[in-house]
């Protein structure tokens, strides 16, 4: 089977992640998958797999889940420590017709308990560390069964003990029924559970496949995305069907990343924006870990021009570009924009891109107050296409409040230029009186102060815009340099400096701005 044939099949029948490993093995079973960590479920498998071995492991796990009692249409919650086997477990559950519910390992016990209750007596696949964390949660009341992916625990079934279970024929779910459930970032409270179908997952491949066509040769793709995120579905599918060697990264420490990149020389890198910010320092690394990169790609959150510029200048590839995708779990990739080596540093970071043609999402901006949306009067950003998530699990009313016919209201505000570029200024809930765009302030100031590792503008207790800053190695910030950098923003209050480790973050490393603002209101902290 050719990758193009497999892709056409997905567009016709939908993307079923339980069938993907077998499909990818039929395209090229020898394609390598390299990990920077050991698998918890298969500790003896090593860190170098082929796609054929990967497919075999998924088939094996599907048989074990069936032997444990999991059946089609059941929901299987995956909550264990971060590991690439989370993706394998999701594929295995899908392969027998169950619906994987992917929960971030970063979620706390109270949040997990709330989501288990919402999902209504699912099977829980977890591990010893997480069971220890959940020791006060009444799992017997909230779940149908608990399965340990590694280790053993009283009252649970062990996947290891089910090794050698008979293989099971795959079960294909209907194209418009739930296939995978992931959750939102939870920046404003308990995360919502987003329901994806085979059709919606397949459609989301369209714009990204065109991006990957920029790399003609079979070169390594390095992927640093949470293994439970909906983005992982598209990233793994496209890389495997293009027969690209895949480097799956769990670790984000710059020293580890530099070693992996220097060894494997990826041509394509997709990572979280905050991880890319952390990796900026590698632009000066003598091993030149980014020298081979042709395309950097990121989504999830705003990324600053300074970061894009430093990474692109560290590449030796002709025509290297940074492709930013604007979207969210509910809509997938909505718009995109390419940034280039010689211009990224002066780009307007609020211009997140243009609608992508031929079968991709449509975008519009709707007035908030009856007036035409503009730069001075931003409106609500809305997206429409058949890649929209189907619903929020067990919260249909909440989903319906954001849905208007074919259009989905993202919760962001912005405007479109005469040339059609979408400018995203802020989340509606993060807007601050007197500030056009907190994200714009952050873009500008970060570009002027290389000693800043993070800057987040939040609303203070008196509605004033308060810049919360973190510096490289938590060094004190020079007050004079700060005043010069923010001269164009006289409305800003004095900055509050905190250690970067104290920033409240989501599972995808987004800063929880409302939580940060609330904590600041309670305890001012250290003044710079």
Image (cartoon, grey):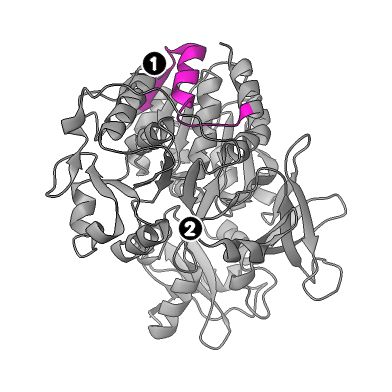
Q: Is residue 301 left or right of residue 64?
A: right
Q: Quadrant of the N terminus?
A: top right
Q: Quadrant of the C terminus?
A: bottom left
Give the crowd class for mark 1: few <14, some 14-19, many >=20 residues within 10 Å. many
Q: Which of the pair 102/411 is nearer the observer?
A: 102
Residue plotted at (37% across, 42% down): 254
Residue plotted at (20% across, 50% down): 129
Q: Which residue is mark 2?
A: 185
Where residue 259 sits in the image (x, y, percent)?
A: 35, 31
Q: Which of the pair 103/372 is nearer the observer?
A: 103
Over which residues does the magenta segment extend?
13-34
Q: Which residue is mark 1?
A: 52
User: Which numbered disc, 2 or 1, marks the residue closer to the eye?
Assistant: 1
Where residue 69 sits in the image (x, y, percent)?
A: 28, 38
Measured along the vertical axis of the image, is residue 213 above or below residue 39? above
- Secondary structure, mark 2, is loop
Residue 413's disc number: none
Q: Is residue 489 left or right of residue 15?
A: right
Q: Is residue 18 magenta?
A: yes
């Amino acid at each position: 089977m050719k990758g193009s044939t497999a892709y056409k099949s997905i567009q016709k029948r939908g993307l079923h992640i339980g069938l993907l490993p077998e499909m990818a093995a039929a395209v090229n079973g020898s394609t390598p998958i390299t990990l920077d960590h050991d698998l918890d479920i298969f500790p003896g498998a090593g860190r170098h797999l082929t796609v054929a071995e990967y497919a075999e492991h998924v088939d094996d796990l599907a048989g074990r889940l069936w032997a444990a009692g999991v059946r089609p249409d059941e929901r299987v919650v995956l909550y264990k420590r971060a590991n690439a086997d989370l993706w394998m477990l999701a594929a295995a559950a899908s392969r027998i017709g169950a619906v994987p519910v992917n929960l971030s390992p970063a979620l706390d016990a109270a949040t997990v308990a709330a989501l288990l209750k919402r999902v209504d007596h699912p099977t829980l696949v977890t591990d010893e560390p997480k069971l220890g964390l959940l020791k006060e949660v009444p799992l017997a009341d909230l779940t149908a069964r608990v399965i340990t992916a590694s280790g053993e625990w009283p009252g649970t079934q062990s996947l290891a003990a089910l090794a050698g279970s008979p293989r099971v024929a795959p079960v294909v779910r209907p194209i418009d029924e739930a296939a995978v459930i992931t959750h939102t970032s939870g920046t404003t409270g308990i995360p919502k559970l987003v329901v994806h179908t085979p059709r919606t997952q397949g459609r989301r491949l369209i714009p990204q496949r065109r991006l990957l066509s920029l790399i003609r040769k079979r070169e390594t793709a390095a992927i640093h995305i949470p293994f439970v995120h909906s983005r992982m579905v598209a990233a793994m599918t496209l890389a495997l069907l293009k027969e690209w060697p895949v480097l799956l990264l769990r670790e984000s420490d710059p020293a580890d990343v530099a070693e992996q990149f220097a060894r494997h020389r990826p041509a394509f890198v997709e990572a979280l924006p905050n991880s890319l910010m952390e990796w900026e320092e590698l632009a000066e690394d003598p091993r030149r870990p980014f020298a081979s990169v042709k395309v950097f790609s990121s989504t999830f959150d705003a990324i600053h021009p300074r970061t894009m510029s430093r990474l692109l200048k560290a590449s030796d590839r002709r025509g290297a570009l940074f492709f930013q995708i604007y979207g969210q779990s509910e809509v997938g990739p909505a718009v995109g924009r390419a940034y280039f080596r010689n211009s990224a540093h002066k780009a307007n970071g609020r211009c997140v891109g243009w609608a992508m043609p031929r079968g991709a999402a449509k975008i519009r901006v709707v007035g908030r107050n009856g007036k035409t949306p503009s730069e001075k009067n931003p409106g609500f950003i809305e997206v429409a296409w058949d890649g929209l998530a189907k619903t929020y699990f067990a919260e249909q009313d909440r989903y319906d409040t954001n849905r208007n016919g074919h259009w989905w209201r993202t919760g962001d505000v912005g405007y479109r230029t005469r040339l059609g570029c979408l400018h995203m200024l802020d989340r509606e809930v993060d807007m601050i009186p007197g500030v056009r765009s907190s994200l714009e302030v952050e873009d500008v100031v970060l570009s002027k102060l290389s000693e800043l590792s993070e800057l987040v503008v939040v609303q203070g207790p008196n509605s004033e815009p308060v810049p919360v800053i973190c510096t490289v190695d938590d060094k004190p910030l020079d007050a004079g340099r700060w005043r010069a950098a923010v001269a164009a923003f006289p409305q800003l209050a004095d900055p509050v400096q905190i250690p970067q480790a104290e920033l409240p973050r989501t599972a995808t490393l987004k800063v929880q701005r409302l939580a940060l603002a609330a904590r600041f209101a309670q305890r001012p902290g250290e003044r710079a």
